[in-house]
C-alpha cells in the first residue's frame, strides 16, 4: 500500500475518488513532442485530478487505484499524496506497470498519446475496496474512463453504481475515443450515467455519443440522476435537476484545455459539500476551470478564498463581465 497523507486518519473522508492515474510526460515549453528538447514528468488522471483540486480547497479526499510497483508508480503516489490527498487506498502491483501518457502541443490544440494497455489500474475488479471504506465517504466520484480499461474495471464500476449506498455517486462521462469508439461507448455510458446521482458531461461529448443537440436533450435522455451537469464549452454550464439552472462561463484566455473538466467537477462538488445551491456550485466549477485553462499544468493552485468569495458574490451583470486573461 502507498503511504497516505498523515493529516488524514482512518477511513473518514468527504470524497472518495477512484480511477487510473498515469505518469504524464509533457514538453517543458509548448512545443510539439517531436521538436521539444526538454520534458517534465508529473501525474495525471481524471479522478485524481478531481481529488487534488478538492484537497486544494480544503476538503478531505481519498484516492483509490492501483499503480505499478515501479519508479513511475511510486512517483505518482508521492505526487498525489504531496498535494494533500490521502493515498492509503492505493495498491502497488509488481506484476503490471504504471500507465504513461504524453501531451503533444500543436497549433491546433494539444493532442494526448496514451500507453496504458495492461496497466496496474486495469487489473482492478469488483472486489477492489471493502464496503465500509466506500461507505465512509460522503461522496464517491468515478468516471466513464474506468469501465473502458478492462472487464474487471467495468464490473467494479457497476458494483459501485448498483450497491446500496450511504451517499451520492458522482459520475463524469469522460468518453475517451482512444479507449473505445463512440459507437461502443454510447449505450454503456448512458446506462452507467443513469445509475449515478450527479452526472457531468460536455454538450459536445453528449452530441458525439448520443446525437443530442441541447442540454435539455441530455436531461431528457438521462432522466434518472438527481442532477445532470452539462458543460457547453466557453458558453455556459447547466445544472438540471428539480430546477433548471444556467450560469454563463466567464471569458478566459485559454493556455491549454486539458484538465479543465476535472477542475470544473471539483469546483461543483465543493459547492455540493458546502450545501450551496446549484448556481454557486456552477460558479465554483467555472472558476476552477478558468484557472485550469490558464495553465499548462493539470493541477493548478485554486483562487484564494477571498477572491472566490468576491466572485461568488457578483450579481449577474458583474458575473457576465468577468474575464480571466492575465489581468485579473
Image: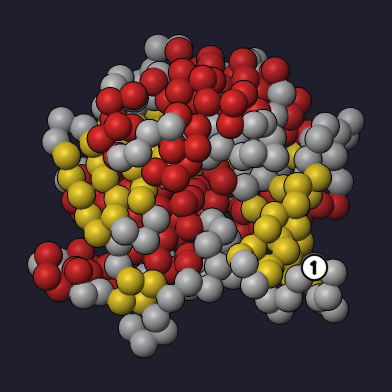
At a point 58% along the width and 31% down the height, the residue shown is 182
Q: Please tell me in which quadrant of the rendered image residue 176 appears.
A: top right
State which quarter of the image contains the C terminus. Answer: bottom left
Against 328, residue 114 (above or below) is above
At a point 20% along the width and 69% down the height, the residue shown is 320
Q: Nearer the viewer, residue 201 or 204?
A: 204
- Residue with the mark numbered 1: 33
Residue 125 located left or right of residue 6:
right
Q: Is residue 183 visible?
A: yes
Q: Nearer the viewer, residue 140 or 207?
A: 207
At a point 46% along the width and 18% down the height, the residue shown is 191
Q: Nearer the viewer, residue 187 or 96?
A: 187
Residue at disc 1, secondary structure: loop
Against 119, residue 236 (above or below) is below
Q: Nearer the viewer, residue 85 or 300?
A: 300
At a point 54% along the width and 56% down the height, the residue shown is 259
Disc tally is 1
Check disc 1: other Cα within 10 Å, few if <14, some if 14-19, many if 20+: many
Position in image of residue 288 (x %, y %):
39, 61
State which quarter of the image contains the N terminus. Answer: top right
Q: Is residue 129 visible?
A: no
Q: Please tell me in which quadrant of the rendered image residue 150 appears.
A: top right
Against 266, residue 11 (above or below) is above
Residue 115 located left or right of residue 109:
right
Residue 70 located left or right of residue 190:
right
Position in image of residue 91 (x %, y %):
72, 34
Residue 283 located left or right of residue 103:
left
Amino acid at each position: 500500500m502507498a503511504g497516505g497523507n498523515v493529516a488524514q486518519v482512518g477511513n473518514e473522508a468527504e470524497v472518495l475518488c477512484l480511477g487510473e492515474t498515469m505518469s504524464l510526460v509533457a514538453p517543458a515549453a509548448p512545443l510539439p513532442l517531436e521538436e521539444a528538447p526538454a520534458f517534465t514528468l508529473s501525474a495525471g488522471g481524471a479522478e485524481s485530478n478531481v481529488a487534488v483540486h478538492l484537497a486544494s480547497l480544503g476538503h478531505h479526499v481519498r484516492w483509490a487505484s492501483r499503480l505499478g510497483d515501479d519508479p513511475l508508480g511510486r512517483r505518482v503516489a508521492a505526487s498525489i499524496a504531496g498535494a494533500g490527498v490521502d493515498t492509503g487506498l492505493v495498491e502497488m502491483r509488481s506484476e503490471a506497470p504504471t500507465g504513461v501518457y504524453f501531451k503533444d502541443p500543436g497549433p491546433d490544440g494539444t493532442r494526448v498519446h496514451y500507453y496504458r494497455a495492461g496497466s496496474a489500474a486495469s487489473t482492478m475488479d469488483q472486489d477492489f475496496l471493502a464496503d465500509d471504506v466506500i461507505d465512509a465517504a460522503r461522496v464517491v466520484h468515478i468516471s466513464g474512463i474506468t469501465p473502458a480499461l478492462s472487464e474487471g474495471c467495468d464490473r467494479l464500476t457497476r458494483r459501485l453504481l448498483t450497491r446500496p449506498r450511504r451517499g451520492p455517486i458522482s459520475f463524469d462521462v469522460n468518453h475517451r475515443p482512444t479507449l473505445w469508439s463512440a459507437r461502443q461507448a454510447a449505450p454503456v455510458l448512458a446506462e452507467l450515467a443513469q445509475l449515478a446521482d450527479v452526472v457531468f458531461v460536455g454538450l459536445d461529448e453528449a452530441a458525439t455519443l448520443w446525437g443530442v443537440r441541447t442540454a435539455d436533450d441530455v436531461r431528457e435522455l438521462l432522466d434518472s440522476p438527481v442532477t445532470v451537469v452539462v458543460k457547453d464549452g466557453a458558453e455556459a454550464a447547466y445544472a438540471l435537476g428539480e430546477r433548471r439552472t444556467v450560469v454563463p462561463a466567464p471569458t478566459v484566455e485559454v493556455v491549454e484545455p486539458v484538465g479543465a473538466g476535472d477542475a470544473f467537477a471539483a469546483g461543483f462538488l465543493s459547492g455540493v459539500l458546502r450545501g450551496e445551491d446549484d448556481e454557486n456550485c456552477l460558479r465554483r466549477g467555472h472558476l476552477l476551470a478558468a484557472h485550469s485553462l490558464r495553465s499548462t499544468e493539470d493541477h493548478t493552485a485554486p483562487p484564494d478564498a477571498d477572491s472566490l468569495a468576491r466572485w461568488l458574490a457578483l450579481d449577474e451583470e458583474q458575473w457576465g463581465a468577468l474575464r480571466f486573461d492575465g489581468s485579473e
